[in-house]
């Protein structure tokens, strides 16, 4: 078979033809048919086809290189207009290859093509990360998330399909690098054989690029015709690497400073003594659930109805907004930001803070010695060393909750079952101390199909009741690929989580119950919309009026549904506000006007020294 990316052989001279003919005649005289060896044979027999193949391969090589040089990093920018520009990298690359001798030219072309292939893979990762997490791919920190992506596909599409997709992605990545290298080598060979034409073309394109750049020529959509996308992107990646490494050093110092780090336990959370406090994170419960025109009516109806039911049962509630440190995923970043009082927006910061002694809100309860602290973590399927950082006496993960029912895509168990297990294992038992609990509800995790439905609490049992419910549910692939269905089903999943939580409080809560619940982040852009905020709802529910009196100066809205004008705080500000409100000096005082900015200092007799173990 002809190697399509090799240089064509020159046509034989008349002497060579004559010699070949004589050889052939000689061969015929001995009864042996002459053979045509080498790649040139079929070209001489089918010159038109050979020429067509050569032009096609060259054209595909050029298209592949230009597509790679102009490839965007967001799905919305993946338009025809984006590729109708002149990349300056192609001009400089062509000029360099024309100046080099044959062997160095091939080496440089192959290496340059391989690098361009690797950059193309990074651009594809950027598209995926921007679509799901609202940010680009971090080449220092984000490789670990590819394993999470594989696990997510396994839960959503099944193990066989997930394995096939993973293998296909690895093979495709290798092919991109190899094909890009071959394409650049092919183009360099063509330019070398036609150096005069190639030189003139490079000069003309270079001149056009300079003119377009100088006069700011733009397409109809406002894109600069003279592109330097790849150069700018390489510079940006290098800057992000430097910033990431610098951020790691700075954050390590920041995490050691803790206004409450050395505060004695008897001065912490004095305003909540004797209360059963429940901190609950609802997966992907974002501002879109309350304000999106398609989603909000259903979720809003649930919040209004449950607010009224709580009021009738003697509970009151207040709500506001928090700006999450993450978007679309990486829930643990939102959890750690909320509980640590530090802005944890990447994996490096998470590792740093959870390996240290910065006081988490949940560990503050443990330090007092006045609460038993537990975690209900249905999303954890293996060891979780972070439990020490969070100060939890015991963590119930998916293996300890006795669930015998089916998984619901990513979610290992329905929220109602997780809450029922909490009641059976901890809350419903007699203790010599009140409980502080951290509960993660996962039923509203993407891909939002199939969704559990509420069953009578007496029928939850070991979870077998959910077998038929899961089988009757919708297929994740059908929902996730439909822009309307995915928003509708996301809203339904949030309604289920909210109903499960508030129903639990109404059934099993008491006069000493205090519930703090919030979303960990907004759902991905396909649901929340392009350029959506990172805001999530947060609410506090209590039966004792004095509990909510202590946060009167927060100016939160009454009820479970915050309004559009409710205060918006950074999620990292909550810990200090909460510890101050429920500390010795946190009795409610009249406030002249609301403040939506996080407080810079904490009161309640905190220490300014770094925490010590």
Image: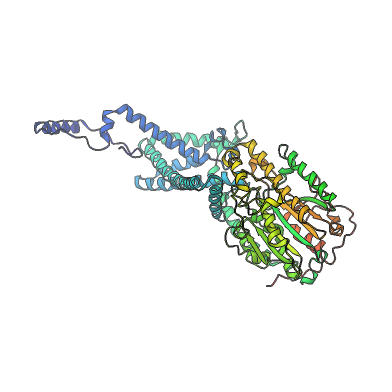
Coordinates of residue 252 in the picture (x, y in percent)? 64, 64
Residue at 71% in and 37% down: 294
Coordinates of residue 315 in the picture (x, y in percent)? 83, 53
Residue at 69% in and 55% down: 420
Count how many numbered circles sit on residues in the image. Answer: 0
Q: Is residue 373 left or right of residue 313?
A: left
- Does 290 sit above or below residue 43? below
Coordinates of residue 9 in the picture (x, y in percent)? 28, 36
Q: What's the colour scheme?
A: rainbow
Let me know if residue 581 appears in the view.
Answer: yes
Coordinates of residue 508 in the picture (x, y in percent)? 76, 56
The residue lying furthest to the top in this view is 48
Identify which residue, 298 or 487, lies in the foreground: 298
- Does 462 sit above or below residue 161? below
Identify which residue, 81 or 187, lies in the foreground: 81
The residue lying furthest to the left in this view is 30
Q: Split into 4 quadrants, where in the image is the C terminus? A: bottom right
- Does 415 sit above or below residue 30? below
Identify which residue, 118 or 202, lies in the foreground: 118
Residue at 79% in and 48% down: 560
Q: Split into 4 quadrants, where in the image is the N terminus? A: top left
């Amino acid at each position: 078979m002809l190697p399509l990316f090799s240089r064509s052989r020159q046509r034989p001279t008349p002497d060579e033809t004559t010699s070949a003919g004589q050889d052939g005649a000689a061969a015929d005289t001995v009864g042996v048919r002459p053979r045509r060896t080498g790649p040139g044979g079929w070209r001489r027999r089918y010159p038109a086809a050979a020429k067509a193949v050569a032009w096609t391969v060259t054209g595909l090589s050029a298209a592949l290189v230009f597509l790679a040089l102009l490839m965007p990093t967001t799905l919305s920018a993946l338009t025809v207009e984006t590729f109708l520009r002149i990349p300056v990298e192609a001009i400089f690359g062509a000029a360099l290859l024309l100046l080099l001798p044959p062997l160095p030219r091939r080496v440089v072309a192959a290496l340059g093509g391989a690098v361009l292939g690797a950059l193309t893979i990074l651009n594809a990762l950027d598209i995926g990360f921007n679509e799901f997490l609202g940010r680009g791919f971090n080449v220092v920190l984000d490789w670990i998330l590819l394993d999470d992506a594989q696990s997510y596909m396994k839960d959503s599409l099944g193990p066989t399909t997930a394995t096939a997709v993973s293998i296909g992605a690895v093979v495709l990545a290798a092919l991109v690098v190899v094909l890009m290298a071959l394409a650049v080598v092919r183009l360099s060979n063509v330019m070398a054989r036609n150096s005069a034409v190639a030189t003139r073309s490079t000069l003309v394109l270079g001149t056009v690029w300079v003119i377009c750049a100088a006069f700011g020529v733009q397409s109809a959509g406002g894109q600069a015709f003279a592109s330097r996308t790849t150069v700018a992107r390489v510079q940006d990646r290098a800057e992000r690497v430097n910033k990431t490494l610098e951020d790691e050093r700075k954050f390590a110092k920041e995490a050691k400073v803790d206004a409450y780090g050395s505060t004695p336990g008897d001065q912490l959370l004095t305003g909540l003594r004797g209360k059963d406090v429940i901190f609950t994170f609802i997966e992907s419960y974002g501002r879109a659930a309350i304000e999106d025109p398609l989603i909000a009516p259903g979720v809003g109806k649930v919040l209004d109805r449950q607010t009224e039911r709580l009021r009738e049962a003697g509970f009151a509630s207040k709500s506001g907004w928090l700006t999450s440190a993450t978007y679309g995923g990486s829930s643990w970043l939102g959890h750690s930001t909320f509980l640590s009082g530090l802005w944890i927006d990447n994996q490096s910061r998470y590792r740093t803070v959870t390996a240290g002694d910065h006081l988490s809100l949940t560990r503050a309860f443990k330090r007092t010695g006045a609460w038993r602290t537990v975690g209900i973590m249905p999303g954890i399927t293996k060891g979780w060393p972070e439990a020490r950082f969070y100060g939890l006496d015991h963590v119930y993960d998916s293996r300890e909750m006795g669930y015998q029912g089916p998984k619901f895509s990513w979610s290992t168990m329905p929220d109602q079952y997780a809450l029922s297990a909490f009641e059976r294992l901890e809350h419903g038992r007699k203790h010599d101390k009140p409980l502080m609990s951290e509960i993660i509800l996962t039923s509203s995790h993407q891909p939002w199909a199939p969704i559990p439905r509420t069953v009578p609490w007496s029928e939850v049992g070991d979870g077998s009741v959910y077998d038929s419910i899961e089988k009757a549910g919708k297929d994740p692939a059908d929902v996730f690929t439909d822009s309307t269905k995915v928003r509708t089903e996301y809203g339904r999943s949030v309604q289920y989580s909210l109903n499960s939580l508030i129903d639990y409080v109404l059934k099993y809560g008491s006069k000493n119950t205090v519930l703090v619940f919030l979303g960990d982040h907004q759902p991905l852009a396909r649901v929340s919309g392009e350029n959506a905020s990172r805001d999530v709802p947060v609410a506090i529910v209590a039966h004792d009026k004095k509990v909510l009196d202590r946060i009167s100066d927060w100016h939160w809205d009454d009820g479970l549904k915050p309004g559009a004008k409710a205060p918006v705080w950074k999620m990292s500000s909550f810990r200090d506000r909460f510890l101050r409100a429920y500390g010795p000096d946190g009795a409610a005082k009249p406030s002249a006007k609301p403040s939506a900015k996080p407080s810079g200092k904490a009161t309640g007799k905190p220490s300014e020294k770094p925490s010590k173990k």
